[in-house]
Image (tube, rainbow, N blue to C red):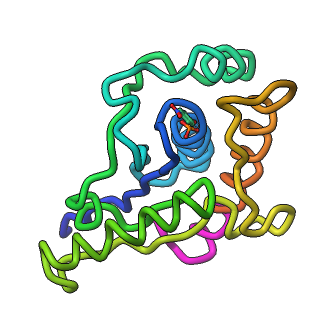
Amino acid sequence: MTYKEPYRILCVCLGNICRSPTAEVVLRHVVEKNNLKIIVDSAGTSNYHIGDAPDSRSQLHAKKRGYHLSALRGRQLATRDFTKFDLILAMDEQNLQQIEKLKSIAEQEFGASALKAELAMMTREDKSQHNVAIADPYYGVGTGFEDVLDQCESASHAWVSYFQQHHIG
Ligand code: 4NP
């Protein structure tokens, strides 16, 4: 039998300490629960939190639902990511624009044929929040961190249905 590379997904937000680490862990959980062979990672478009653990508020709210974020560390999206990942999921439109900009730099660096990443909003496959942004909870009050978890859980189930329908993973 020939070895097939696993499908790889990168979740991207601004800081890589609130939304994308949450998306990474929630999507990985749903992927594994459905026995799909998919690798999930996350990164930020900014360099603000390189090496930092996820925001303590994200960790706390996630933990209440059984998700563990503490081992993750912030990293910045890099041009080589476009050659490694099959799907890059943006948490909001600003992130998507930044990802598109970096993709054109990656194209110059590696050549278009070396890039395999498809870009999409985290919520693309989710009928209940189609292409809606995962709202940034960083400066917010109230239910922001719970809302991120709700949105990521709903979006992750939708992506897994999509992967199953398209025989991905
Ligand atoms: P994230 O949230 O993009 O969901 O990780 C933010 C984290 C940090 C900052 C902004 C948003 N910041 O400006 O430092």
The answer to whether residue 128 is left or right of residue 148 is: right
- Dividing the image into four quarters, tell me where ligand 1 lies: top right
Furthest toward the bottom, the residue is 113
Which residue shows up at 73% across the image and 36% down it? Answer: 149
The answer to whether residue 86 is left or right of residue 62 is: left
Q: In this rendered view, identify the residue nearer to me: 34 or 117.
A: 117
Q: Position of residue 36 (x, y in %)?
A: 50, 54
Q: In this rendered view, identify the residue nearer to me: 55 or 63.
A: 55
- Residue 41 in view: no
Residue 64 vs 17, above or below: the answer is above
Locate residue 164: give its quadrant: bottom right
- Residue 148 in view: yes
Which residue shows up at 60% across the image and 18% down it? Answer: 59
Which residue shows up at 38% across the image and 31% down it? Answer: 74
Q: Position of residue 33 (x, y in %)?
A: 61, 42
Q: In this rendered view, identify the residue nearer to me: 94 or 38.
A: 94
Residue 166 magenta: yes
Q: In this rendered view, identify the residue nearer to me: 145 or 47.
A: 47
Locate residue 132: give its quadrant: bottom right
Q: Provide the major secondary structure of the magenta segment.
A: helix
- Locate the N terminus and report the quarter of the image it occupies: bottom left
Q: Position of residue 118 (x, y in %)?
A: 43, 74
Residue 45 vs 6, above or below: the answer is above
Q: Position of residue 56 (x, y in %)?
A: 59, 14
Residue 153 vs 98, above or below: the answer is above
Which portion, as a residue range, is magenta?
160-169
